[in-house]
Amino acid sequence: MDSVEKARVRLEHWISHNDHHREDYEKFVKELEEAGKTESARRMREMMDLTLRSTECLRKALEALGR
């Protein structure tokens, strides 16, 4: 496996990893909101937005590798 293929595998893994975390974060945010911890929930949503942006960068990096 050459370095480009290794990079492709790593990027795909990180994208999947981030997507799975996002699902967990959403559940956690709902728990915080139900507990009345709106500021913590708001900060978590802020972090989720940043995570989404980082995932978009990973997707673009993967795209730039070509097929």
Image: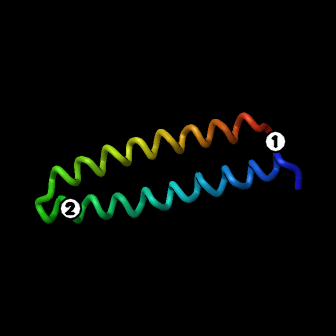
Q: Which residue is mark 1?
A: 67
Q: Residue furthest right?
A: 1
Q: Residue furthest left?
A: 36
The residue under the point 27% across, 58% down is: 29
User: Is 15 positioned to the left or the right of 22 in the image?
Assistant: right
User: Is 63 positioned to the left or the right of 15 in the image?
Assistant: right
The residue under the point 50% across, 55% down is: 19
Q: Which residue is mark 2?
A: 32
**Quadrant in which residue 28 is drawn:** bottom left
- Do callouts 2 and 1 mark residues in contact (Cβ within 8 Å)? no
Pointer 2 local density, CA inside 10 Å: few below 14, some 14–19, many at least 20? some
Residue 38, percent from left and from top: 15, 53
Label 2 to label 1, Cα distance in Å?
42 Å
User: Is 40 positioned to the left or the right of 2 in the image?
Assistant: left
Amino acid type indicated by mark 2: Leu
Quadrant where the N terminus is found in the figure: bottom right
The residue under the point 76% across, 38% down is: 65
**Quadrant in which residue 22 is drawn:** bottom left
Quadrant where the C terminus is found in the figure: top right
54 shown above or below 2: above
The kind of secondary structure element at disc 2 is helix
Residue 46, percent from left and from top: 31, 43
The kind of secondary structure element at disc 1 is loop
Residue 57, percent from left and from top: 57, 37
